[in-house]
Image (cartoon, rainbow, N blue to C red):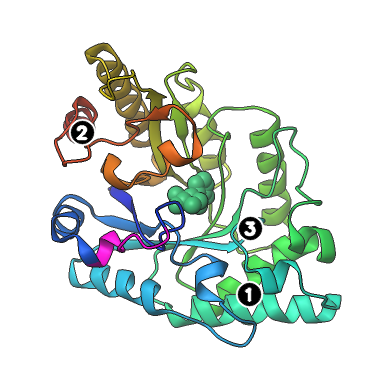
Amino acid sequence: DVVIGTAVAGGGHHLEQDYPDPFTSDGRYRRVLAQQFSSVSPENQMKWEYLRPERDRYDFAMADRIVDFAERNGQAVRGHTLLWHSQNPAWLEEGDFTDAELREILHDHITTVVGRYAGRIDQWDVTNEIFDEAGQLRTEENIWLRELGPGIIADAFRWAHEADPHAELFLNDYGVEEANAKSDAYYDLAQQLLADGVPLHGFSTQAHLSLDYPFPHGLEDNLRRFDDLGLATAVTEMDVRMNVPENGRPTRAQLREQADYYRQGLSACLAVEGCDSFTIWGFTDKYSWVPVFFEGEGSATVMTDDYTRKPAYYSLWSTL
Ligand code: XIL
């Protein structure tokens, strides 16, 4: 059975600095979240910059609230994320650490965070976005790969597995919907890790899509080749952005096309046996990251700012 998930907005990263956290301030938001979804992913709240304000201090307040909420509502949780090049605290990125210290910082983080939620988080994005479009490891941008070398990937998986032997451990990235240089690199890495006995359990694709590009028709086949390796697969962050007309309202044709993208995304996952988790990156445009990150684009989620269901909403729930 596939779980249908959503990112939980908050941490405020792309929202105004003093914007109230939707998860605590918006009752309607919480109701839809509780009623319509069987899985949740913290959009920001488990990233390093939120969990690790200082080297020797963890702040679990926001993350705990989400995990508690999910438990009360019988929802699965996807943990996001442990090893990434982005949204790291300045003390880490700008710090002056020896390799041994950095290793210990990462080991402590994974052990503490994964251990804290052991048994309560179903899937972890252990690594996020470790390859670039050309299929090369991001050794410049990613502090862990740069300072500690590619072997740290296997270590991260091993440490996470020790901390929670029941969590499914994933490689996660964007732009890997179809077979291409980047997803090929994952395919090779996955085979290597499995051959080395590393506890890797899944491969997932974010699926941040745009109506400016055709739907990635190779999605199903691509998920299937990872499935054939014995891995679970997942769609973890789907949204479908578009160029919003000047009046701020998408056309009917745009909304229809968007609905079709969502339908195809979910269908691809449903068609692959081991694809058991399908998550959208937020369910209302009210808190979507898209307008802030992609100029002129928006309307990427399945509900409008005022929670009106779009055709995309109905296409998802009728595809299930
Ligand atoms: C985004 C969040 O939605 C924003 O709030 C934040 O400011 C930046 O990150 N790939 C990922 C997610 O793995 O963590 C990103 O989330 C979107 C792209």
- Magenta part of the protein: which range? 17-24
Q: Is residue 65 magenta?
A: no
Among the 4 quarters of the image, the one containing residue 159: bottom right
Q: Name the spot of residue 26 as percent of width and height, x first.
A: 19, 60
Considering depth in this image, is 284 or 256 the residue closer to the camera?
284
Q: Report the residue marked by disc 3.
A: 84
Q: From the image, state whether disc 1 or disc 2 is nearer to you.
A: 2
Label 3 to label 1: alpha-carbon separation: 16 Å
- The numbered mark at residue 313 is 2
Beta carbon of the mark 3 residue lies under 8 A of ligand 1 = yes
Badge 1: residue crowd in 10 Å (few <14, some 14–19, many ≥20)? many
At a point 62% along the width and 64% down the height, the residue shown is 88
Q: From where the camera sits, is residue 120 visible? A: no
Q: Horizontally, is 225 left or right of 187 in the view?
A: left
Q: From the image, state whether disc 3 or disc 1 is nearer to you.
A: 3
Q: Name the spot of residue 109 as percent of width and height, x first.
A: 60, 78
Vertical placement of residue 50 versus 298, above or below: below
